[in-house]
Amino acid sequence: MSDEKSTNSADEGSADATDERRFDTSSSTGSASGTTERSRGERREPVPSNRFVTDRRVTLAATFVVAFCSIAYELVYSELLTVFFGGTVLRYSITIGLYMFSLGVGSVLSAQLGEPESNFLRTEVYLAIAGPAGAMAIVAVNSLPAMTFSGKGQLVLALSHVPILVVGVLSGFEVPLLTDLVEDREGTVFASLGRLYPRRIVRGVLGVFFAVGEPDERSFSEVLGVDYLGSLAGTVVYALLLYPRFGLVVSVFALGLVNAVAALAFAAWTFSGSAFTLSRPTTGRWRTVLVVGLLLTGSYAGLVAHPNAVDRAVTTTYLERTIEGEFPAGTADVRARSYDTTPYQTVLTYERDLEGHAGTETCLHLDQALQLCDRWVDSYHSGLVDVPMSTFDDPSSVNVLLVGGGDYIAVDHLREYNASVDQVDLDGEFLEMAREREFFRQYNDDAYEYDRLNTTTEDAFTYMQGTDETYDLVLLDVPGVRNDETLSLYSTEFYTLLREHLTDDGLVVTWTYTKGNHPSHHKAYTNTVREAGFDRYLPYYVFDDLDGDDELEAGERFYILSDGPTPEPALERAESDYIREYADTFDEWQWWTIPRYRGVDPNSVLHPNYDIIVDY
């Protein structure tokens, strides 16, 4: 503790012993009611009691805000790291661990800090800068140009975690600084609230397990209590309000705005009037910090006032660069057409020009996964729908469950067979988007109006647990397993539910990642499906002219899964122009026994196998 912050018996009554940075001694009464003793080996000079309470309330409010914003910043970082590196449990666990560690580092380093008022204000301003800047740094580091060098992956991963440490260390300064500012428990907001609970009962219960005594006058426990309360509020507000409404990008600027406003409020309230005497150099530093705070407040307020524009500008720029990075440098040009966020996913439509591909094609991305491009949208849905539908003698009698398919394109294909369709999709906003926007309507032909369609907006796993319906055909038109959020749709439990809701001759159809490109995923997925009770599969590709050079290339890969019947598609029954034109591209149909790979665990909800996640 610095000499400026303590007094001793030798000079207790002198003017030099007065903490001139904080209190004007001319306003001190020197009475017992205005004097506070601290039990940490030091004593403060008398202060005006009316100003004392006011300062305490402001300081505790600032404590709440700092904790609120700090924990919310870490949640933003965790989600960003999950987006870039996958593994939700791993990312959140590491973030929490690093954050707690850096809080401890900041607390230790705070022993070197003097001027608690000045340094607390600076901490608020620095957090207002570091919080949003950290999020943008994570995005920037993961958007590096498509270059390769030894250790690039490890370097990017390490740099992406630096913002966690920066925010954590700054937040660690908070409690020690605020403890120096909050001098007295009596008369505080929390002391007043303390009279509302049955103290005798509480002390009696505590006395069963602990040795209880009379409460001391230390402010540490009060500051820490407000700090924890702010952390709770930050997690709840972020999860229920900020992230669902604004997404990651705008949320982090909103948190920066709260930090900046709190810094200005703290400065204006605490240092207004004549209660403090500041030296000229100190006054100059304060002015600089306040100017920065004002600039941050204005900038963040402008960004938060236009959330859609900000989110679109940052996210589409990142996504454009990321998609281009999937191809060799200089061979792809990507331009976003529309960008939207729903409570469950990001929806990006874009135009792309690829070297060696004739013309421009328009594509759809959901989160990190490519869903369709107009050059192969028909071949994909013909493979998903028309090939398996051709295995049924009377397609109009088929009861179909469509999992996903929120663009209604698969429904349009099923309508050609007059089949009964139950569709379950989690994202109601995306379903509405597909009903209203021309990009989707050009492919689905208003199939949402099909009179034999029943659409349920619900999680597919939950739906399968609650329904008693059985199906002749289940079509899985679901996103790829690119992160933890879709793990349940690739689990043993989910495929077991599917099998249990099949009729005796029922089939499950899904697109799949190829074995050659994703061997780890293939092994985990295969063992998962086999563990769920399926023992045979019929594999096939669809072929199309993917690059416009009048040559056919292999497109999507599909599996038909069964635990009993092994029907052969009769493509002449398919109601598809694509199938009629390209029927001769399909190989001879052959059912195979689903293999089992030794040493590879199936993916389970309770025991996930993260090898099933595809990261490319």
Image: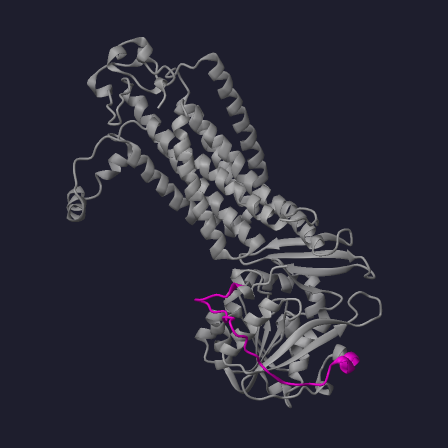
Residue 307 in percent (x, y) is at 58, 44
Give left or right: position of 363 versus 340.
right
Q: In the rendered image, which quarter contains the C terminus?
A: bottom right
Place of residue 383 in the rendered image (x, y in percent of width and height, measured from the top left) = 68, 76
Foreground pick, 578 / 7? 7
Residue 166's place in the image compared with 560, above or below, is above
Pick the residue in front: 342 or 537: 537
Residue 28 appears left or right of 289: left
Magenta-drawn stretch contains 133: no
Q: Check the image and tell me how it is coloured.
A: one colour
Extent of the magenta region: 581-610
One can see residue 415 in this view:
no
Residue appearing at x 71%, y 56% in the figure: 350
Q: Is 566 placed above or below 129 here?
A: below
Numbered label tally: 0
Which quadrant of the view contains residue 136?
top right
Q: Where is the N terminus found, in terms of image quarters? A: top left
Residue at image position (64%, 64%) is 434
Residue 609 included in the magenta stretch of the image: yes
**Residue at image coords 57%, 43%:** 159
Instruction: Please provide percent x and percent y for residue 39.
Output: 24, 27
Looking at the image, the residue that sits furthest to the bottom is: 393
Picture quadrant of residue 454: bottom right
Check the image and name the residue furthest to the right: 550
Q: Is residue 387 left or right of residue 466?
A: right
Task: Give the quadrant of residue 536.
Answer: bottom right
Q: Is residue 529 visible?
A: yes
